[in-house]
Amino acid sequence: MKTAEETKWSLNRVLLLLLFTALAIFALFPIITLAIASFKPAQELLRNGLNLSLDKELLTLSNYTNLFSPKENYVTWYKNSVLITFTFTVLCLLLSSMVGYALAVYKFRFRNFLFVLVLIIMAVPLEIIMLPMYKLAISFHLINNMWGVILPFVVAPLPIFFFRQYAGGLPRDFLDAARVDGCTEYGIFFKIMMPLMAPAFSSMAILQALASWNNFLWPLIVLNSTNKLTIPIGLSTLLTPYGNNYKILIAGSVFAIIPVLIVFVFFQKYFIEGMTAGGVKG
């Protein structure tokens, strides 16, 4: 028989479960509404707007059929976004982890000064440095190509800070043992430290891939050819003073969520562990 304290604890758990369920439904409501709207014709959307109606007579796959038709550029934008996001995430994790690892493990002159610079850069809004970055992009012929989107942010202050904190909490005995066995410094990083930092890599992979996939302002400035655009920029071109292509816009927005979900499902096992460990170690 349950005691009064156990009954109170069970009641609190039920209330918390109901509260979190309600919050989850509230958070998912816009996505559910958008997903339903993606199966409705444009005339219905203009007439009744976004709603939760599931009238079978109004639901159609024509929006998705048009989305992947050769006359639309959506597939090209999708390929561009996947290529840019994948390349950026891989390079950002590799280079930022090496910088963070060096700041955490090696003792050299100006190490603390460089770390303070990283913290200062984290506090500077992107809009402030946008103009000098654009001038640099012009100087290095990075306008209207994928490297112009990737390279300016490939070594980012947030991943450096996170990897520095995580690497600083790892035991140094592994490094000393590897050096005694004759392993090079690069070998120590790639063969020993990278596997130990797997939770940190997973956490940063989700955050950086999501940031790159949704990046809007900088690609809008750098890219100007229709066949070079990413999904956020490409979808924004469907809204014009001469007409709005809602059927492609909504269906394309829903389909653009899929890669983000795949990345999160693939790395979510280590996400919480990595975020927690990176926040307390160092």
Image (spheres, rainbow, N blue to C red):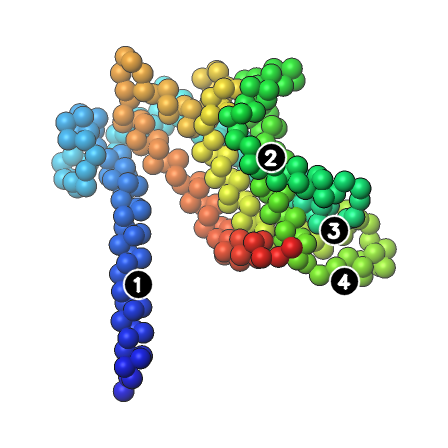
- Sequence-wise, the earlier of marks 4 and 2 is 2
Instruction: Name the amino acid, label 4.
Output: Asp
Q: Are marks 2 and 3 in contact (CB under 8 Å)?
A: no
Q: Are marks 2 and 1 in contact (CB under 8 Å)?
A: no
Is there any visible trace of residue 142 in the rendered image? no
- Sequence-wise, the earlier of marks 2 and 1 is 1
C-alpha distance separating marks 4 and 2: 32 Å
Q: Are marks 3 and 1 in contact (CB under 8 Å)?
A: no
C-alpha distance separating marks 3 and 1: 43 Å
- Sequence-wise, the earlier of marks 2 and 3 is 3
Q: Which mark is residue 173?
A: 4
Which is closer to the viewer, label 2 or label 3? 2
Which is closer to the viewer, label 4 or label 3? 3
C-alpha distance separating marks 4 and 1: 44 Å
The residue labelled by disc 2 is 121
Instruction: Name the amino acid, label 2.
Output: Ile
C-alpha distance separating marks 4 and 3: 12 Å
Q: Please tell me whether mark 1 sits on a helix, a strand or a loop.
A: helix
Instruction: Name the amino acid, label 1.
Output: Leu
Q: Which mark is residue 26?
A: none
Instruction: Name the amino acid, label 3.
Output: Val
Graded by Cα atoms within 10 Å as few (under 14), some (14 to 19) or many (20 or more), the crowding at tag 2 reads: some
Is 257 on the left-hand or right-hand side of 10? right
Q: Please tell me whether mark 3 sits on a helix, a strand or a loop.
A: helix
Please tell me whether residue 164 is drawn above or below residue 214 in the rendered image. Answer: below
Q: Which mark is residue 16?
A: 1
Which is closer to the viewer, label 2 or label 1? 2
Residue pictured at 29% horizontal, 69% vertical: 12
Residue pictured at 32% horizontal, 27% vertical: 249
Q: Could you say which is closer to the camera, residue 256 or residue 49? A: 49
Q: Please tell me whether mark 4 sits on a helix, a strand or a loop.
A: helix
